[in-house]
Image (cartoon, rainbow, N blue to C red):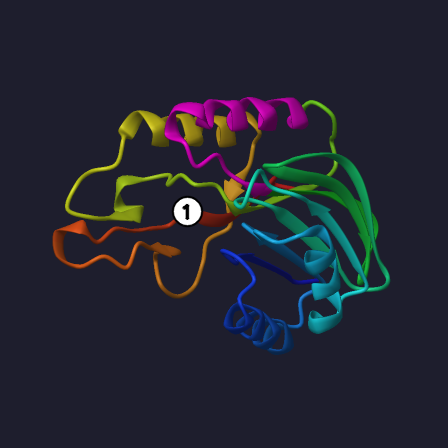
Amino acid sequence: MSFLEWNSRGGAPATVQELVILVQTYKPSLVFLCETRQSEDRVKNLRFCIGMRNCFHVKGEGSGGGIALYSLDGIEVEVLSFSKRHIDAYISGGPYESKWRGTFVYGEPKASDRHFMWDKLRVIKQHSTEPWLMIGDFNEAMWQEEHFSNSRRSERLMLDFREVLSHCDLHDIGFLGTPWTRDNKQRGVRNVKVRLDRAVASPA
């Protein structure tokens, strides 16, 4: 079973076309989108473009935010809780008979409010002993070397992130390719590249 997580930053035609190509290339069983920035009808209808059977959508506030989880036919998704920042579910089907816990995250963009997201993850941890995978855009890096910029990232904020992952017994499963997932596209000393997206999992 494979997964695709993507911060889509809206639903412009070029963005949708790029998503379709990604799905056709990697053939994921589940697709999680952050920052959908679209109406519920548009987000749900996108499942036909990417060949998915089901969609669970949480609308953002105003013209920003929004998250959506798409799944293939035959993949059972039992949503346990959700907010504008997360979807937590039991997942089963595909090549695995036993169910597992999947939490799909769009982290708090505002640094001063990020602790609310970490508190929510601690609460989620208490309600399940199933094998657990968490994936998404956490809006935070773990280490200074994941932040490529002329200025340093807040050590305190990264420590808070590492501490909640340790509390939940979740471990980064690594990556291949470019070491950042966000580029602000600015020039010179104003350019910031950082790894905000990742997948973490319990030992099980």
In the rendered structure, which amino acid carries the disc numbered 1?
Leu
Q: Main secondary structure of the magenta part?
A: helix
Instruction: Tell me which residue sits at (67%, 27%) in the image.
Output: 124
Q: Considering the image in quadrants, where does the C terminus appear?
A: top right
Q: Residue 184's x, y, as percent? A: 30, 54
Residue at screen point 32% across, 40% down: 143
Residue placed furthest toward the front: 62
Q: Position of residue 52 (x, y in %)?
A: 76, 66
Which span of residues is magenta-colored?
Answer: 105-125
- Tell whether 74 sits left or right of 47: right
| Image mark count | 1
Q: Can you tell which quarter of the image residue 159 is in?
A: top left
Residue at 51% in and 41% down: 171
What kind of element bears circle 1?
loop
Task: Pick whichever, 2 or 129, lies toward us.
Answer: 2
Question: Does the magenta-highlighted stretch encompass residue 193?
Answer: no
Q: Nearer the viewer, residue 141 or 70?
A: 70
| Residue at position x 20%, y 48% in the image | 149
Seen in the image, is 184 located left or right of residue 167?
Answer: left
Nearer the observer, 48 or 98: 48
Quadrant of the rendered image containing residue 59:
top right
Placement of the N terminus among the 4 image quadrants: bottom right
Q: Is residue 83 above or below residue 156?
A: below
> How many neighbours does mark 1 have within 10 angstroms: few (below 14), some (14-19), or many (20 or more)?
some
- Is residue 108 part of the magenta span, yes or no? yes
Q: Is residue 170 left or right of residue 155?
A: right
Residue 94, percent from left and from top: 81, 62
Residue 182 against residue 141 in the figure, above or below: below
Residue 142 position within the rendered picture, expressed as x and y whole percent measured from the top left? 37, 39
Examine the image and state in which quarter residue 47 appears.
bottom right
Say above or below: 19 vs 179: below
Which residue was labeled with disc 1? 196
